[in-house]
Amino acid sequence: MDMKKLLITGFDPFGGQTVNPSWLAVAQLPSQVGDFEIRKLMIPTVFGSAAQAVLKAAAAWQPDVILCVGQAGGRDSVTPERIAVNIRDARIADNAGNQPRGEFVAPDGPAAYFATTPVERMAQAIRDADIPATVSNSAGAFVCNDVLYTLLHHFDGTRTQVGFLHVPFLPEQGKPSMPLETITRALTAAISACSFRNGAAQS
Ligand code: PCA
């Protein structure tokens, strides 16, 4: 089988939480899913540094797909993100104490990018595994959006696909929540859907 390479990232805990389900679920993934070889990276919930850590790992390994995962407290389903916007607007400080309000991610960049992973297929694949999933049209304006926008800007026009998934809280963090095993299965299903390339905004 012709193996492809997928780099998947999760964040460290932030905002007073002691765990972040995004990294815990990523850490549980096997080293191979379908025809993808998987490498995992924990990134800091810090504007700028998080994306730089992903870019560094990507430069070294040259993955075909980069999938970043983050926690979205308050959401009750797994949500592939369709779009990233060129704005940093933080309600809380990041893990380095930064709290940008209304700044650009990239002053020379367009207002927004569409994710280049097949977001509808990813959501469908997760639902096919009996896990609630729906495409999200906003990744917010905190560090998750910052990472997605920076990567899409960097890899614009290249063959490298970039996508993002937000996942709910774990039961111990509050409601709504999803068990860790379920989130991990959702990631596996989403990865399998990444063997297709996104052709259009709605795919
Ligand atoms: N979620 C935050 C940043 C880190 C994370 O896991 C966000 O949604 O921006």
Image: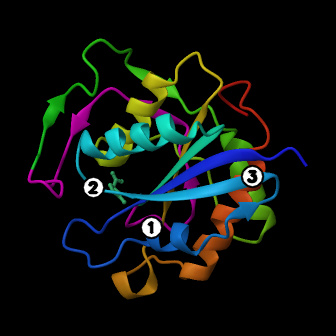
Using residue 116 as the reference point, say whether residue 24 is left or right of it: left
Q: Nearer the viewer, residue 89 or 162?
A: 162
- The amino acid beneath tag 3 is Phe
Mark 2 or mark 3: which comes first in sequence? 3
Please tell me whether residue 199 is drawn above or below residue 157 in the rendered image. Answer: below
Q: Nearer the viewer, residue 115 or 96?
A: 96
Disc 2 C-beta below 8 A from ligand 1 = yes
**Helix, strand or loop for disc 3:** strand
Q: Which residue is mark 2?
A: 45
Please tell me whether residue 174 is drawn above or below residue 153 in the rendered image. Answer: below
Q: Please state which of the two labelled residues, at mark 2 or mark 3, is closer to the viewer.
A: 3
* Residue 43 occupies quadrant: bottom left
Please tell me whether residue 42 is drawn above or below residue 148 in the rendered image. Answer: below
Q: Are marks 3 and 1 in contact (CB under 8 Å)?
A: no
- The amino acid beneath tag 2 is Thr
Using residue 104 as the reference point, say whether residue 6 is left or right of it: right
Looking at the rendering, the stretch of residues picked out in magenta corresponds to 72-97
Packing grade of label 1 (10 A; few <14, some 14-19, many >=20) is many
Q: Which quadrant of the frame does ligand 1 lie within?
A: bottom left
Residue depicted at 56% across the width and 33% down the height: 115
- How far apart marks 3 and 1 lie (CA) works out to 19 Å
Q: Main secondary structure of the magenta part?
A: loop
The image position of residue 42, as x and y in percent, is: 40, 60
- Give me the disc on residue 36: 3
Please tell me whether residue 127 is drawn above or below residue 173 in the rendered image. Answer: above
**Helix, strand or loop for disc 2:** loop
The outermost residue toward the top is: 108
Residue depicted at 29% across the width and 69% down the height: 13
* Residue 20 occupies quadrant: bottom left
- How far apart marks 1 and 2 lie (CA) works out to 11 Å
- The amino acid beneath tag 1 is Trp
Q: Which residue is mark 1?
A: 23
